[in-house]
Image: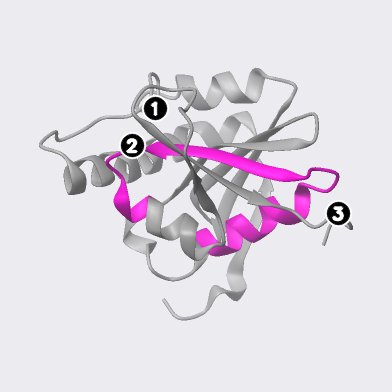
Amino acid sequence: MNDNSLFSIRAMRLEDVDTLTPVMKAAFDEDTRRHTDLMEDGPEGYDDGRLLRRFLAEPEAFCRTLWLGSRRIGALIYRKEGDVCVGEILFVDPSLHGFGLGRQAMAVLESEAAGCRLIRLETPDYSTRNHRFYERCGYRRLDEPGFWAQTVVFAKDLPEDGR
């Protein structure tokens, strides 16, 4: 794949969940296998659609589907808590890792976070590939406990003018 011009992000709809769930499972499980002795692992409901449906039902959650042409390839979910934007979920089909699609999704998150002073997110402590990805996107690792056990917190300050 060498043309990201077909990449787009749209509001997630309930009908996206059945297609996105196996993509999310594959992405989370691939990361788990890469960094642990487990074959699969993820947050409760990541493998059966409950997690995505839960976020879709939360009015304060911004749920986005990542598309490549007519194919659903991942998701981005975040929420705004005052002047902090909290990244909840980001995944891309593992067969498409390394093509800059995650970076494009992060750029959309940053542009949609207007009015926020900071973006904060967490990722499993074992997911060193994710750590490097967020650092390449300009996030810094914070020395503070995460909301979830065994997670690492990253943050990025946003310009006051929203750009």
Given the image, on which type of amino acid does mark 2 rest?
A: Lys
- Is 122 colored magenta in this rendering? yes
Element type at mark 3: loop
Residue 13 visible, this orientation: yes
Image spot of residue 154 (x, y percent): 52, 44
- The stretch of residues the image draws in magenta is 102-130
Is 78 placed left or right of 71 in the picture? Answer: right
Q: Residue at point 39% right, 39% down?
A: 24
Q: Is residue 159 above or below residue 45?
A: below
Q: Which of marks 1 and 3 is nearer the N terminus?
A: 1
Marks 1 and 3, Cα distance to the nearest angstrom? 35 Å
Between marks 1 and 3 in the image, the one whose residue lies nearer the viewer: 3
Q: What is the x, y in percent for residue 109?
A: 67, 51
Q: Earlier in the sequence, mark 3 or mark 2?
A: 2
Residue under numbered circle 1:
46
Q: Where is residue 163 in the image (x, y as percent from the top left)?
A: 82, 62
Most distant residue in the right direction:
161
Mark 3 crowdedness (10 Å alpha carbons): few <14, some 14-19, many ≥20: few
- Label disc, if present, on residue 160 of the rendered structure: 3
- Whether tag 1 and tag 3 are in contact, CB under 8 A, the answer is no
For label 2, the residue is 25
Residue shown at the point (31%, 51%) measured from the top left = 128
Q: What residue type is labelled 3?
A: Glu
